[in-house]
Amino acid sequence: MKITNVELYEVEIPPIAPIAKYNPKFYDITLTRVTTDEGLTGWGECQGRKADLEARFTTCIGADPLAMDPFTQPDPITCALLDIAGQAWGIPVHRFFGAQVRDRVPVSYWSCHMDPVDTAAEAEVGARLGFTNHKLKARPWDIVETVRLMKQAAGPGYSVGVDPNTLFEQPSVAARLAGELEPFGTIANFEDPVLKDNLDWFRLLREKTWIPIALHLGAPAGVLAALKAEAVDQINLGGSALQVRRSAALAEAANVPIWVQMGGLCLGVLAAYSVHLQATLPNATLPCDELPFMRVADVCAGSLAVEAGHFVVPQQPGLGIEVDLDVVEKYRVA
């Protein structure tokens, strides 16, 4: 078998209207399609512009995809090669990562920072769709009012993940806000609540609130440092599939649960790849941040199913999804 072509599709699929009101575009995304002389096609996805990726992504033309080491390639090519290998050998991609430990992967609903009334309206939508956790970008001046209105709209069992992107800045601010939020119950976590250059601050916050303290990390070295400092109750892991797998193993050894954000506001191809990986990570028990359903169109045409706040892990060979080229072409910009 030989790779005959590598095609790149830079696409811009807008976010759903409530988010577009505040953020009309969320980063550049390029899909990668790898085709072979035996009719198999593999897909990958990453952030970035097509023009910046072509030189790195087309060097494998002419190679045997089954003879290549996929984990030496850029992660979108890794994904495409595993997709092809899974189809060739009749196994789903998650088999390449280890034993499957779950057939459904929890996922959060999501909001950017919005007016509290608008966030509450989105919480009502999320609850109606069957989600039980809502991740939102938080700001110190309105997070308490936002959560109050969300609870009124979605009910007391609807949990909230608070992500201020370090904008609470100081432990004194974060601790005060935690105290004001605790009476609402079901606050899932504080993610990156304060500046990240002092892990002692995160350890201090763990002593001041029952709300779990989380860090958004990637490389194993950063995860190890946070664990040694006893700075986290939870970890949000990003990066390549191989990096996430290695970092997750460190957190598992310390009995720390994780969630995964390989793509965030990605499309369905990267979300499917992440779901396959998460299906094999024992401590990936928290709702992930892969959010293709927060855009107005689905390049997978529903083939990556979301049911009651969970992705259903595909069991078909390869990624187990069908990419709708009509949708890709409709939103293609390069």
Image: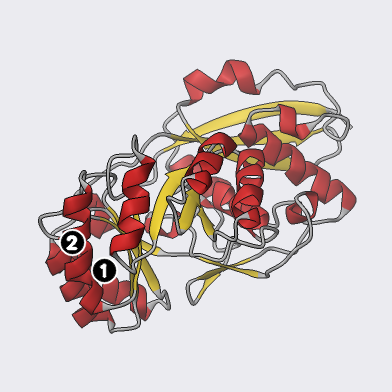
Residue 292: % across, % down: 46, 54
Q: Which image quarter holds the N terminus?
A: top right
Mark 2 belongs to which amino acid? Leu
- At 59% from the left and 52% from the top, the residue drawn is 251
- Indicate the position of residue 108 as horizontal and vertical percent values: 42, 64
Furthest toward the left, the residue is 141
Drawn side of residue 294 relative to residue 56, left or right: left
Q: Classify residue 236 as left or right of residue 155.
A: right
Kindly identify the residue that appears in the image at 37 percent across and 36 percent down.
27
Q: Along the line of sight, which residue is nearer the eye, 326 or 216?
A: 216
At horizontal 46% and vertical 29% (from top left) the residue drawn is 48
Q: Is residue 114 above or below residue 84?
A: below
Q: Amino acid at mark 1?
A: Glu
Residue with the mark numbered 2:
177
User: On the image, which quarter does residue 127 sit in?
Assistant: bottom left
Asked if 219 appears above or below 92 in the picture, the reply is above
Q: Nearer the viewer, residue 28 or 109?
A: 109
Q: Is residue 15 visible?
A: no
Asked which quadrant contains residue 212, the reply is bottom left
Q: Point out residue 107 in the picture as x, y percentages from the top left corner.
A: 48, 64
Going from the N terminus, do you reach mark 1 or mark 2 first?
1
Q: Which mark is residue 137?
A: none
Above or below: residue 301 compared with residue 57: below
Task: Between residue 61 and residue 253, name the one nearer to us.
Answer: 253
Mark 2 falls on what kind of element? Answer: helix
Label 1's element?
Answer: helix
Q: Position of residue 99 (x, y in %)?
A: 79, 60
Q: Residues within 10 Å of mark 2 (few under 14, many from 20)?
A: some
Q: Which residue is mark 1?
A: 122
How far is the residue under mark 1 from the one under mark 2? 22 Å
Which residue is at a point 53% across and 57% down the rendered structure image?
A: 258
